[in-house]
Amino acid sequence: MRLRRVGATSHNEPAADAPHTERSELAADSTPCFAGRMSGVGRRTLRPVGGRRARLPRPVGPPRDVVGRHQMLRVRGRTVTWLPPLLLLGAITAIDFNTAGEFRMISWVVLVPGIAAAICGVWGTMVFAALALITYFLADTSWPDQYQSGLPDFILVAVGGILAVLACEVRVRGERRMLHMRDVADTTRRTLLRPLPPVWGGLEHAEVYLAADTEARVGGDFYDIQPGLHGTRVLVGDVQGKGLGAVEAAAALLGTFREAAYHEPDLATVAARLETRMLRHGVHLTALAAAVESPPAPQRPARTLARTDSNISRRRGGRGARPSGGRRGFDGSGLRDDGDRFATAVLLGFPEHEDGVVEAVLFGHEPPLVVGPAGVRPLPPGDGLPLGLGSLAADDDPPSVVRVPLAAGETVLLTTDGVTEARDAAGVFYALADEVAQAVAADPGTAAPRRLVAFVRDGTLRHCGGRLADDTTVFAVRRAEEPSGNGRLRS
């Protein structure tokens, strides 16, 4: 993740890294090479300006997913995994029957249970192992004695069938374990990036999340919409780094946002609580790392709380020492500096009784774009530092809240650096603002959240050839013409 320099952006930086070789996947489409999540965008609506569907990069190589592999072996919803080993068994038997006695290949049926072990279930593999053994016996005994392969090859086929069944059992167990882990990852993603109704809190929205690492299926990008007592708030951000540490930080920020955005009357207070939560998260990880390295003596709860508050105060003021190092992995793999993790984010507020205004607080994030029939304009960059780095500010004042006019029909487009830092083969960054401006000028209807998200998604994948260097989130939101459901509890 790259920090934004306030007041300056560049799209001409030299390419520091080669394009990522991992493929991403989009759940809204059936394209096998994309694995991510898209909300509010249907398959039939993903058409760019001009009416023609975007040509997305095709998958490279065979599907790496067990589900995709089994889907390839289905015809009209029925499995045909039995067909390849059966055809092989028939071919070997026919060739052996039609060749001279000096060239016997019936023992090649030992390959049949091996093929079945790779694509069939355990019972199917057992059936083919038995068929191979029976076929060998019948075919071999049908020849005169001088041409029979005899007992050695019979034992070879029998042992090969047994080993194939055992190998199939190991494969099936591994696939079950992998599918279970995938379900756990999907559940984690749904908890972190919870599904949202198409119109929520008086806002019409659409979003897409593309994970650069298809195996992880969830990363450090986060977003949410929270209706509250004083309007609806939106949060989109990106945690520095990758892995479980980034997911933990994103979960901590979203939990605080959902509570603070509902209750707090001022957007500045919500922003301050997010900064405090990130600091508390860092203090917790630092204390955990110190406990793992050298377990402290038992302390009284009040004293422990006082030490925690003192650590937060020192980090805010930039004074005092803190435990060196970061969080050590429990597998002994090394030191991880999760205690100093930070996050860039954009916090938006849509006041309940001011339809023509949007409030924004930027924490070191790229300024969102306001897209409408009149054109494209960026929001002011703001003066906030990334969440977790507030102690580096020259003063203790919270980030300023910017109020920007928002006309009816205008959409706020928020993206993470997976979009702005997408490079083509020549290392040129994706020109998001220019592309969106041209699309809206050609067809003002592109400003609708669904079409806008689909356009940016397709353009980003096309520009980088389907190889994302970072997790990518595209989020578009505007006030709904017909609000349905404000998300507030009724008294």
Image: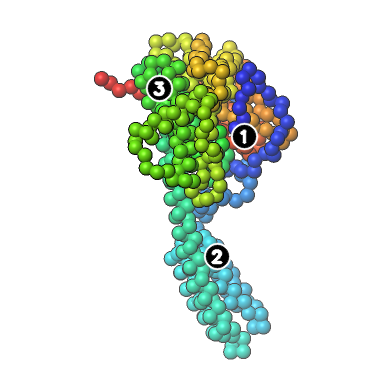
Q: CA distance from mark 3 to mark 2?
A: 57 Å
* Amino acid, disc 2: Ile
Front residue of 424/388: it is: 388
Give the quadrant of the N terminus.
Answer: top right
Kindly report which numbered mark, 2 or 1, lies closer to the viewer in this rendering. 1
Residue drawn at x 42%, y 43% is 296
- Which quadrant of the view contains residue 91? bottom right
Kindly report which numbered mark, 3 or 2, lies closer to the viewer in this rendering. 3
Q: Earlier in the sequence, mark 1 or mark 3?
A: 3
Front residue of 318/63: it is: 318
What residue does disc 3 label?
261
Residue 461 numbered mark, or none: 1
Residue drawn at x 48%, y 21% is 347
Q: Position of residue 464 (x, y in %)?
A: 66, 35
Q: Is residue 28 left or right of residue 440?
A: left
Q: Position of residue 117 (x, y in %)?
A: 51, 64
Does dot 1 land on a helix, a strand or a loop?
Answer: helix
* Amino acid, disc 3: Ala
Does dot 2 land on a helix, a strand or a loop?
Answer: helix
State whether residue 228 is above or below residue 164.
above
Q: Alpha-carbon neighbours of circle 1 within 10 Å: few (<14), some, or many (≥20)?
A: many
Q: How is the image coloured?
A: rainbow
Q: Position of residue 248 (x, y in %)?
A: 46, 37
Q: Alpha-carbon neighbours of circle 3 within 10 Å: few (<14), some, or many (≥20)?
A: many
Q: Earlier in the sequence, mark 3 or mark 2?
A: 2
Kindly report which numbered mark, 1 or 3, lies closer to the viewer in this rendering. 3
Does dot 3 land on a helix, a strand or a loop?
Answer: helix
Front residue of 302/407: it is: 302
Q: CA distance from mark 1 to mark 3?
A: 33 Å
What residue does disc 2 label?
115
Residue 447 seen by the camera: no
